[in-house]
């Protein structure tokens, strides 16, 4: 493929991803966009441009030893992370995502046991019972109009005591997304002070998405 065509292809993929993160975009608009994007999402955000799901699954494989652990993939989308978790030997994995169309694509991959078409919100809980999971993984579900800062309390609620929580996101969103700026990491730290969880590690990864730096948080629930 000529280099000019490669550049055009990359530009198109970036534009499609950016459309899901336009500043000021509301959650219902984001979900609508993902519903419309679902059919080509896997092609547009393959591992050559977006490594987040594989990074999340690889980190899970390091910190979650028991392959029978019950895991939930939050913001599962079309099931990329579930696919990589299954390659690591995890088979007791559920998916949660607000986009029904994305979940239909994920269902066809046969990597999840249960699929929940629900959103992580700031002011209400999901239908999932408290302390259900041994581990939770999340990749790419933070962004403009995505999971709000206060949603991390609901994320923590889903996990059992001593369970592992892995959050992977684009580093620049900590400042570029108004809802997260001076709020997301401070709330994470506040939840440490409240003894909801404690931090195991926090590190950056290069080439997380479109050559952008990613950041990985690993917490253990108290």
Image (cartoon, rainbow, N blue to C red):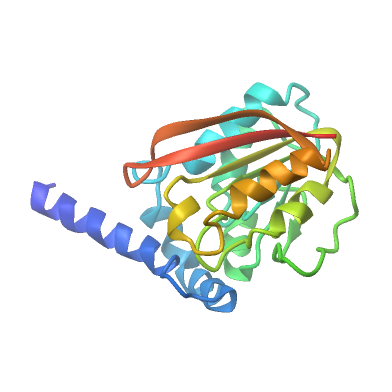
Q: Is residue 88 left or right of residue 123?
A: left
Please say if 189 is above or below 106: above
**In the image, residue 29 lies at what x, y percent?**
53, 78
**Camera-nearest residue between 130 and 41:** 130
Task: Identify which residue is drawn at 31% across, 58% down.
Answer: 14
Count the numbered circles shown. Answer: 0
**Camera-nearest residue between 95 and 200:** 200
**In the image, residue 133 lies at what x, y percent?**
83, 42
Task: Identify which residue is drawn at 68% across, 50% down.
Answer: 187
Task: Identify which residue is drawn at 48% across, 61% down.
Answer: 177
Quadrant in the picture for residue 107 = bottom right
Q: Residue 71: tell me if it is visible.
A: no
Please say if 138 is above or below 100: above
Q: Is residue 195 left or right of residue 31?
A: right
**In the image, residue 44 lies at what x, y percent?**
37, 56
**In the image, residue 80 lies at what x, y percent?**
54, 46
Quadrant in the picture for residue 128 = bottom right
Please say if 120 is above or below 187: below
């Amino acid at each position: 493929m000529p280099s000019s065509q490669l550049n055009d292809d990359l530009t198109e993929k970036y534009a499609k991803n950016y459309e899901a993160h336009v500043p000021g975009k509301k959650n219902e608009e984001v979900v609508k966009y993902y519903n419309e994007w679902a059919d080509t999402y896997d092609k547009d955000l393959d591992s050559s441009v977006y490594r987040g799901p594989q990074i999340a699954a690889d980190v899970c494989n390091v910190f979650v030893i028991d392959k029978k652990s019950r895991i939930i993939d939050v913001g599962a989308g079309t099931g990329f992370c579930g696919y990589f978790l299954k390659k690591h030997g995890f088979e007791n994995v559920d998916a949660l995502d607000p986009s029904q169309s994305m979940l239909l694509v994920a269902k066809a991959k046969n990597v999840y046991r249960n699929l929940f078409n629900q959103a992580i919100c700031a002011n209400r809980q999901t239908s999932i019972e408290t302390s259900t999971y041994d581990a939770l993984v999340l990749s790419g579900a933070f962004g403009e109009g995505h999971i709000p800062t206060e949603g991390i309390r609901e994320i923590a609620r889903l996990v059992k005591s001593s369970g592992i929580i892995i959050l992977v996101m684009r580093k620049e969103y900590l400042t570029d997304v108004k809802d997260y700026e001076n709020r997301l990491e401070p709330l994470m730290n506040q939840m440490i002070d409240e003894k909801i969880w404690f931090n195991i590690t926090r590190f950056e990864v290069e080439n997380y998405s479109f050559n952008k730096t990613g950041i990985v948080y690993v917490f253990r629930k108290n």
